Every structure is written in C-alpha cells, then in structure tokens.
Amino acid sequence: MQIFLLTHPREVGKVTNTGRLVNRALSVGNSENVSAQILLWSRTQANPLLLDSIETTSTLLLYPSEEALLSPSEDSSNLEQQQLMSRVIPAQNAVEDVTSFIILDGTWQQARKIYNKSPYLKDLKRLHLAAQTPSRYSLRRNQKTSGLCTAESVIELLKLKRCLKSADAVDTLYSQFLIEMQADKKQH
C-alpha cells in the first residue's frame, strides 16, 4: 500500500507539520508493505509520479465531501451518520482493493485550495474518515472540530486497512511529537 502525502509548499518547513512523522514512521521497512511518500504540490504542474499512480493503480483520495465513502465511527446511532451511511458504500469494503491513497497535507484551508486547484483530484473516489476518537492535535488555531491532522488521518486509514503495526508505528512517533511540542510550548 502506498500513501502519497500531497503537501502544500507552506507546510514543508513547519515544525507543526505531521506529514514528516508519517513519512519517517513508514520509511523504515515494515512487514505490512506500507510506504509513504511526500510529494510537493504545485498549482501549475501536477506531480508525474502521482499522475502515474492515478492512471495505473486503484487510488483513493482522503477528502471529506458529500460523495465520499464514509468510514464507520463508533457511534453510528447518530441520525446524521445513519443518513450518510445509507447513501454510501461502507468504506471497509471499498478500501479493500485500493493500493494507493492520496492525503492532502496542510491546513484545512490549504487542503481545500489543493483540491480546488487540482483537476486531476476531482474525478477520484474520495474517502471521508469518521474519527474513532477526537483529535489530539491542538498546535494550531482554526481547526475543524471533527477534523484530524495528517498523522491522525493516516493512523485511522491504516486501522481501516488492518495495517495495525504500521498504525502503531505512526501513533508512537505522533505521541512523542505531541509530548515534545507541548513541553516546548510550556517553556515559551
């Protein structure tokens, strides 16, 4: 399984970016055959590697929308969730044969810009993750209440694909990152 982190240029140098953690956690050889690759997004030129993957493999975009496949949440008693679930194929079944995933790495505003300015993403099937737990990420302002950061999204995706060792590897680095960032925040 290949995870492409399509990263907004402004995210590359930010210490609060969690895409780097995902890349590092999954770059070490793993038995589940999961890898991640950071691809820098450009408004004017699509990445050839990404375009090739879209053309030759089963690729899914992780991006919330009305047409997106919805992953199950623990609380499916919510009426809104039940209505959404009735309109989409369960994500567990839909991701079974998917070999490549694209995750937009940036703030919510940057992710929206990447999506809106990249015509090659518009025709892809999309997956909306219903978070199993609330986000632990509190390092930035203007976060969506139900939103997940890049690392948390990858962890949920890996769990959905039953790649539990890889999910644990990302979660371990992410937990360490949060502890270090909170400690650093308290010192300033």
Image: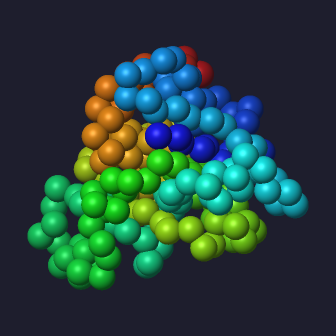
- Residue 142 lies in what quarter of the image? bottom right
Q: Is residue 161 visible?
A: yes
Name the colouring of the figure.
Answer: rainbow
Residue 46 pos. (x, y %): 79, 56
Q: Is residue 111 above or below residue 2?
A: below
Q: Which residue occupies the foreground of this view, 126 or 144?
A: 126
Q: Residue at x 37, y 29 (%)?
A: 32
Q: Is residue 136 visible?
A: no
Q: Which part of the image, by quadrant, shows the C terminus?
A: top right
Q: Residue at x 43, y 62 (%)?
A: 127
Q: Residue at x 51, y 17 (%)?
A: 28
Residue 95 pos. (x, y %): 37, 56
5 sits left or right of 100 in the view: right
Residue 158 pos. (x, y %): 36, 40
83 sits left or right of 121 in the view: left
Q: Which residue occupies the foreground of this view, 38 or 182?
A: 38
Q: Which residue occupies the foreground of this view, 186 or 114?
A: 114
158 sits left or right of 17 in the view: left
Q: Residue at x 62, y 35 (%)?
A: 37
Residue 29 pos. (x, y %): 48, 18
105 sits left or right of 74 in the view: right
